[in-house]
Amino acid sequence: MCLFKLLTGMPCPGCGMTRAYLHLFKGDLAGAFYFHPLFWLIPPLLLLVIFWKKPVVQRINRNRYFWLALIVVVCGAYGYRMWHLFPQQAPLDFDPNGLIPRLFTNLTTLFA
């Protein structure tokens, strides 16, 4: 489960990543892209972490434009997915049983 979704009821930018890899491992590339279009970014990022001390990787890690571009791509994909899939289509569905939505529901019934 996603901790962010458990607390807020809202999907996080990484929601659907596990299901994307499950579809990829079954050979369903279209399904993998549906559940998270940026699933392919994880292996290169893992390589950056594994080879952190290498000079070429250190150059990439120090490049603020690389990280800025990565943030823009992740936020852009999240915004696009939220616009088109939220709140009723998995993996970006709203969970009314999240902690904050339940608190608001209980508070509104208490003060109603």
Image (spheres, rainbow, N blue to C red):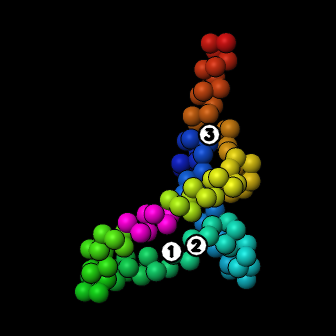
- Residue flagged by tag 1: what amino acid is it? Ile
Q: Quadrant of residue 110?
A: top right
Which residue: 29% across, 74% down? 63
Q: Secondary structure at mark 1?
A: helix
- Residue flagged by tag 2: what amino acid is it? Phe
Foreground: disc 3 or disc 1: 1
User: Which residue in the protein does label 1 denote?
Assistant: 42
Q: Secondary structure at mark 2?
A: helix
Give the extent of the magenta segment.
Answer: 68-74
Q: Quadrant of the C terminus?
A: top right
Q: Are marks 1 and 2 in contact (CB under 8 Å)?
A: yes
How far is mark 1 from mark 2, CA to CA?
6 Å
Residue 69 is one of the magenta-drawn residues: yes
Where residue 53 appears, as percent x and y from the top left, is 26, 82
Q: Secondary structure at mark 3?
A: loop
The numbered dot on residue 39 is: 2
- Going by the image, does 73 lie left or right of 94? left
User: Which residue in the protein does label 3 denote?
Assistant: 98
- Going by the image, does 21 lie left or right of 54? right
Where residue 33 appears, as percent x and y from the top left, is 67, 72
Looking at the image, is 64 positioned above or below residue 79?
below
Classified by dominant secondary structure, the portion drawn in magenta counts as: helix
- Residue flagged by tag 3: what amino acid is it? Gly
Q: Quadrant of residue 35?
A: bottom right
Looking at the image, is 65 positioned above or below residue 12?
below
Which residue: 38% across, 79% down? 48
- Which comes sooner in the sequence, label 3 or label 2? 2
Residue 2 is one of the magenta-drawn residues: no
Where residue 76 appears, as percent x and y from the top left, is 53, 61
